[in-house]
Image (cartoon, helix red, strand yellow):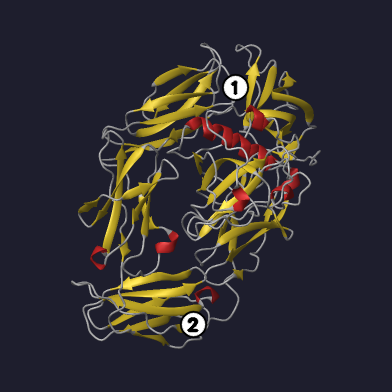
Amino acid sequence: MVVRDSFTGCGDIVWVGWPLPGSQGGSGSHLDVLTSITICSLYPTQVSSSLQSSASPRSSKGMRVYSEATQHGGRGPEAPALCFLEVQISRESSVPHTSALFRPAWPYHPRHSLQPLIGHLDRGLTTMSVLVVSLLLWGLSLGPATKAAVFLETRPSLWAEAESPLEPWANVTLTCRAYQGSLDFQLFKDGVAQDPVHLFGVEHQFHLGAVTSETQGLYRCRTGMGDGWTEFSNLVEVSGADSLAPPLLSAEPVSWITPGFNTTLVCQGGLRGVTFLLRQEGNDEFLEVAEAPKDTKASFLVHRAGNYSCSYRTHAAGNPSKPSATVSIEELEAPPPPALSFKRETSAFLRPGVRVSFLCVAPLSGVEFQLQRGETKLLLSMSSTSPDRVFFHMDTVAPSESGLYTCRYQLRGGHMAWSVDSAPVELQLSDGTLPAPVLELQPSSSPAPGELVRLLCHAPRAGLRFSLEREDKRGPRVLGRLSPAGAVAHFELRDVSVQDSGNYSCVYVDPAPPFAGSARSEPVELHVDGPPPKPKLRPLWQGAVTPGRDAVLRCESPLSDVTFELLREGEVVTSPVYPATGPGADLVLTYVGPQHAGNYSCRYRSSWPNPLLSELSDPVELQVAGEGSPGPG
C-alpha cells in the first residue's frame, strides 16, 4: 500500500497538476489541475525533495502538489509532502479563480485525451509523482466522484511453478510480478538478498531447477520503484520433495456469518496450478475442492459456523500438503457493532449553533448506516471517504440535541439484519448562561508521579451533568462526564504522570428543558514532574527465529495516545506505530535474516497534551537460527 506524508488531518484537499509547455515553475506557474484528492488516513514517511521545493531542477516538469485545508477555504503554501492511504478522487475541470497560483492556462475536460498531458511528464519523475499520476489516471476513469476509497497496491506478487505436477519439486521456477513495469527485480531467500536483475518488464522468472537443500527456503521478491524499491512480496516456501508447505487460510471480509450474510474463506498457496481442499473440524472428508489452474488461491463460500483449515495437492493421486492454520467462523444473531466517534474538532464541550460531525465505522464494506439519538432515527447529511465508514453532519446543533448517540449498519438492499448498536457517544452543549462552577485540585497541584489526583467541580445546586476538560494545542478535550447526586462532581486521575500535566476546567448543564449550561470554570494547572514511565519490550517468539520468518516484539506503555518505535543499537528500525487497542503495540521485523540479529529496545513518544519521549526499554536479544552472511543490498 502506498503511504506518504503528511497534512494537517483527515479531510484535507490536495490539488494535483503539472506545468504546461512554456511554464517555468514557481508560484506563477500555469497548472492544469487534473483532480483533487481527499486525504483519509495519514502515516508519515519521507518524500523526495523535488516534491518539497518549487526551486527543484525537475519541478518544471515533475508533479506539483499543493494542499488546501478545507476549513480555511483558501490555498495554502506548497505542501511539504504528500500522503495517502485511502483517498477519494473527484474530477475538476479547473481550479476556482480565487487563487492566482491555480489559474489554469489549459482547462482540462474529462472527455479530452490525456495523451498530450502524459507526453510532458518527465522520465525522471519521483516515485511519488509516478504513483500520483497512476492514481489520477485511475480516478479519472471512475467517474465524476468516487464513492469508495481508491487503493493503489504496489507490492509485487511471487509464486512458484513446477514443470510437472507429478514431480512438483523436480524443476521449479519462481515468478516475480511487478504492479507495473519495472527496471529491477530482486529475489530474497531466508531474509538474505540475492543479486538484483536489471531489465525492464512486468515480471521476471528465477529458475531454481531441482529443489535441493541449497534451494529450499522462504522466498520473497521486490521490484524497483523510482529510485528505490517496493515493499516485499508475499512469502513463498519451497519445501522440497518430502512435503508441501502449508497454505494460508483467511476469512474475507469478516470471520462471522449471520442470517442473510455468508463470508468467504480464501486459501492461498505458493504453487500455481494446484487443487485446493477445504476441511471443517470434526469432518474427515473435504467439504469442497477447487481447482486453480492459473492461480495460487481459491475461495470457498461459508454457510456454517465452525473451525476450518485448507490444504492443496498438485495432482489427483498426490498427497495433500500440510494443513493451514485453523480459522474459526462464528455465527451471530446480528452483525457486531460498529465504532462511533466524534470527528476531531467536535470532541470538546460545545456551544449551540456549531457544526458537529460523527464518524461511524463498520467492520466490512458495502453497507448502509443509520445514526440514532436514543431511540430516534436521524436523517442527516452524510459523506464518506471509504466504503466501510460514513460521516454524519449536523450543521447547527441546539441544546435540545444533547444526549447519547449510537449508529448501526446493514448490507445495502436489506439482505442482512441491522447490526448491534455501537457504544454510545455523548453530545453535550452549553449556552454559557448559568454561573461558572469552581474546580478544585486535591491533594495538590504538583503531585508526585503515580499518585491519585482528585478534581472536584462545585456547582450551585444538584441535579446537573458535569464534564471535565483539558486544554491542549488543538483546543479543549473532554476527559470525563458525571451526574452526581449532589452539587459536586468528583473526577479522578489515577497513577498520574508527566502526560497528565496541563490546564483543566469543568462545565455543567441542566439535563431538563430548556437545557441551559454554564460557562467554563477558571482553569487550574496540574504539574507532574519526572520522566514518563519506562516501556516494556517482550518478544512474541521463543528461541532463535527461523530465517525468512517475521519477528514480532510487543512494546507496552501505561500511557495512552502514544506512538511506539523499535530501535537497534540506538537506531530506529521501524516506522512509528500507533496502537489500535490496548496499552501497547506489536513492532514487526519483516522477513528476518542473519543481518537482523542483535539487541533491540523500544520507546514511545507523544505530542498530546505535552510533548514527551520515554527512555528506552530494557533490551531484548534476537537470535537468528543457522549461519549466514547478510549478502548484497
- Amino acid type, mark 1: Leu
How many numbered tags mark residues here?
2
Mark 1 and mark 2 residues within 8 Å of each other at the beta carbon: no
Quarter-wise, where is residue 350 in the image?
bottom left
Q: Is residue 317 left or right of residue 23?
A: left
Q: Position of residue 422 (x, y in %)?
A: 31, 52
Nearer to us in this view, 326 or 352: 352
Residue 99 sits above or below residue 285 on the image: below
Nearer to us in this view, 543 or 587: 587
Quarter-wise, where is residue 531 in the image?
bottom right
Mark 2 neighbour density, 10 Å: few (under 14) some (14–19) many (20 or more): some
Residue at left 62%, top 48%? 4
Name the quadrant of the C terminus.
top right
Q: Which residue is mark 2?
A: 526
Query: Residue 271: which disc?
Result: 1
Of marks 1 and 2, which one's residue comes earlier in the chain?
1
Name the quadrant of the N terminus.
top right
Mark 1 neighbour density, 10 Å: few (under 14) some (14–19) many (20 or more): many
